[in-house]
Amino acid sequence: MKETVCKSGYTATIRPPVSITGPEKTANAKSYEYTGPIGDAEYEHLVSLELGGDPNDPRNLWVEPPSPGHKPGAGPNNPKDSVESQLNTAICSGKTQLAAAQNTIATDWPTALAKLGLS
């Protein structure tokens, strides 16, 4: 993991360019019937890149509408991002295993930290 999820800048090396994800995000939004401003939605990974998720597998991606309390035009606001970062830190510090973090984020992200004894 030292050369992947625990390496600073790793996600930038595997993230597809906007020229690919932009059209995918637009098509995905239509498939979910999302009609809000596309810039306020996030093209979200079920298992984030910082947790070893596949960067471009359609089964790992969807357009996520803005969270409650979002200010229109402010871009995505996703509380899941903080949980993903905390899980990455726990993985890289040896407090949890990668597979356990991936499973909890994919099945019930709001309780992931508690289920792994990290909160």
Image: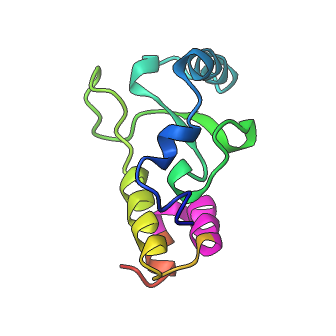
The residue drawn where x is 51% and y is 62% is 109
User: How far across and down, in percent of the image, does residue 16 sit?
Assistant: 59, 29
Residue 10, compared with residue 101, is above or below; it is above
The residue drawn where x is 39% and y is 59% is 85
Residue 2, compared with residue 19, is above or below; it is below
Q: Nearer the viewer, residue 64 or 94?
A: 94
The residue drawn where x is 57% and y is 15% is 19
User: How far across and down, in percent of the image, does residue 98 sit?
Assistant: 59, 70
**Main secondary-structure element of the magenta-colored stretch:** helix
User: How far across and down, in percent of the image, does residue 80 sit?
Assistant: 43, 53
In the image, 17: left or right of 59? left
The residue drawn where x is 73% and y is 36% is 58
In the image, 106: left or right of 76? right
Give the residues in magenta: 99-111
In the image, 88: left or right of 48? left
Quick one: quadrant of the N terminus? bottom right
In the image, 71: left or right of 83? left
- Residue 113 image-quadrant placement: bottom left
Residue 62, compared with residue 103, is above or below; it is above
The way the protein has been coloured in the rendering is rainbow
Q: Is residue 103 magenta?
A: yes
User: How far across and down, in percent of the image, does residue 20 sit?
Assistant: 62, 19
- Residue 14 image-quadrant placement: top right
How many numbered discs sit on the rendered protein? 0
Quick one: quadrant of the C terminus? bottom left
Q: Is residue 44 magenta?
A: no
Q: Nearer the viewer, residue 12 or 63?
A: 12
